[in-house]
Image (cartoon, rainbow, N blue to C red):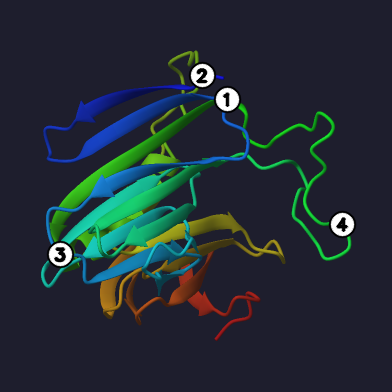
Amino acid sequence: MTSRAVLHYIISKNGGMEVSLRVIWNEPEKMLRLRLPAAFRIRETIGDEPFGVEKLRGNMSENCSGQYVIAESNNTSFAVYNNGTYGSAVDSSGNAILISLLRSPVYSGHPTRETGNTPQDRYLPHIDIGEHEFVFSFVAGTRMTVRNNAARQAAVLNDPPMTLSMYPDGNGHTTESGVIIEGDDAILLSAWKPAEDNNGSILRLFNPTDERRKARLVYMNISCEMSLAPYEIKSMRVSGDHITETDLNEQTI
C-alpha cells in the first residue's frame, strides 16, 4: 500500500501563510499527524471551544478543540487555524504542535473485555482510507495580538463570503449597510436572525477575549454603545427605531 501527500503554500503579503494539504491515505490501523515545530519555547497552548478557550494538555495527549490552536511563549504566539480538523497534541519535549489529520482503525473496532480485539480472519473496512484535503492558516505575533484576533481570523477561514450571480435591471436603489461594529475589531457578530416572537431582529454579539471590550453597534440608521465582559454573549433586539438588550431567551432585560 502506498500513500502520497502534496503541500501547497500561499504566503500573504500581510505576513500570514495558508497551507493546502492533499493526502491519499492507504495505511490501515495507523495515524497521520502534521508536525509544526515552534521557533520559541512553548509554555502554554490553548484551543478554541464554543464561546471560549481551553488550556490544552501537553506530553502528546490528544486534545480536541475548535477552529484554532495557539502556542504561546512569554510574549510570542503562533496560531494554527483549521477548517474542520479538531484533534491536536502538544510535544512539550520536542517543542511542537501536532495536528491530528487521519486515523484508520476498523469501523467500531474498539476492543472490549467480551469481544477482545477486532477479528483478523476477514476483510473489514477502515476509517479515513482514501483521498482527503485539509486547509490551514498560520499567523504569528505578540501574545495579545494573536489572542485578540484569533476568533475573527478563524471566521475568515471557515466562513468565506458567498458569491451570487445576479442580473439587476438598474431600476433599484442602493440598500443601507447592515450591521456595523465600530470601535473594536475583536467583537464578533455570531447571529443575526428574526426574533422568535416576530418583533424585530435579534443580533447576538460575542467578546472572544479575556478583556472587557467596548464598541458601538450600528444597525441601519440607529446605534447604541455596548460593553462586553470577557467571553460574554450579548443579545440585542432591533425593533423599529430602538435597540434593547435581551437575555438568550429573547426576554428584555
Marks 1 and 2 in Cβ contact (< 8 Å)? yes
Q: Give the spatial CA distance, label 4 vs label 2.
A: 31 Å
* 218 relative to 87 in the view: left or right: left
The three-letter amino acid code for the residue at tag 4 is: Thr
Q: Secondary structure at mark 3?
A: loop
Crowding at mark 1 (Cα within 10 Å: few <14, some 14-19, many 20+): some
Q: Earlier in the sequence, mark 3 or mark 2?
A: 2
Specify which label sits upstream in the sequence, 1 or 3. 1
Marks 1,3: beta carbons within 8 A: no
Q: Callout 3, which amino acid?
A: Arg
Identify the residue position indicated by label 3 in the image: 41
Tag 1 or tag 4, which sits nearer the N-term? 1
Residue at 17% over, 68% down: 144
Q: Is residue 216 above or below residue 163?
A: below
Going 42% across and 77% down the picture, which residue do you hit?
232
Number of residues whose C-alpha sits closer than 10 Å to that of mark 3, classed few (under 14), some (14–19) or many (20 or more): some
Q: Would you say the residues marked 3 and 2 are in contact, meaning their CB atoms lie under 8 Å apart?
A: no
Identify the residue position indicated by label 2 in the image: 2
Nearer to us in this view, 13 or 236: 13
- Indicate the amino acid at tag 2: Thr
